[in-house]
Image (cartoon, grey):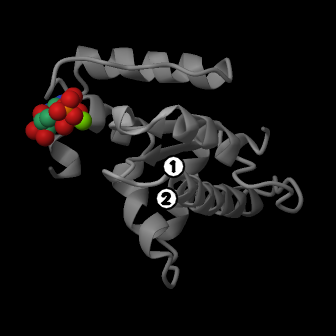
Amino acid sequence: MTPQSFIATKEHRRFAEFADAVRRQHTIGICYGQAGIGKTLSARRYANWHKAENLIEQWGPRDDSDYQIYAALARTRTVFYTPAVLTSPKQIHAELEHISTRVSICVDQHLEKIGKKTGPHTRTGKHVELLIIDESERLNATALELCVTATTGTT
Ligand SMILES: Nc1ncnc2c1ncn2[C@@H]1O[C@H](COP(=O)(O)OP(=O)(O)OP(=O)(O)O)[C@@H](O)[C@H]1O
Ligand SMILES: [Mg+2]
């Protein structure tokens, strides 16, 4: 799907309102619905993952145009994550820490650029406010709990 072909449907607006509320209230929410209704696409769009995914995954040499991505991540402060089938809780925890750290560094870069840097990274995912897990039925209770600790740093 090209970025232009995304349609801001009523379902997407409802998803965004729900995600905003979960993020604001520092809580956990479950989003469910028929296959193909647009859950994955809505979540990716909300997290600006269609813009940030390559940068977060490849973590290669930077370009001036990347500042637009840092700004987009700073607006949503959201990590989008899809656990692979048969991933162990330990692996999920490690992957989430990894992604959250990278997103947080990007937000830091943005804050630095606009003169609002908040000091050194004191914990993993310092700037991450929402973690969206797609296909979360792949996780067992232990893995879900580890997801929370991976981003909040609490146990
Ligand atoms: N907002 C949208 N704009 C454009 N196309 C959309 C939108 N939402 C869904 N689609 C179309 O529907 C397809 C399925 O969407 P998506 O994968 O997000 O569904 P899903 O709810 O995650 O399904 P599943 O439960 O199977 O994971 C997309 O590949 C896309 O073609
Ligand atoms: Mg899906």
> Which quadrant holds residue 34?
top left
Label 1: element kind: helix
40, 75: nearer the viewer: 40
Is residue 29 in view from this perspective?
yes
Label 2: element kind: helix
Seen at 53% across and 49% down, the residue is 89
> Which quadrant holds residue 37?
top left
**Residue, disc 1:** 72
Is residue 7 in view from this perspective?
no
Q: Is residue 81 above or below residue 60?
A: above
70, 11: nearer the viewer: 11
Question: Residue 103 location, x and y as percent?
Answer: 59, 56
For the residues labelled 2 and 1, say whether their Cβ atoms are less than 8 Å apart. Answer: yes
Q: Quadrant of ligand 1?
A: top left
Specify the quadrant that holds the C terminus: top right
Q: Is residue 63 above or below residue 29?
A: below
Seen at 51% across and 85% down, the residue is 61
65, 45: nearer the viewer: 45
Question: Residue 26 location, x and y as percent?
Answer: 68, 23
The amino acid marked with disc number 2 is Ile
100, 13: nearer the viewer: 100
**Residue, disc 2:** 69
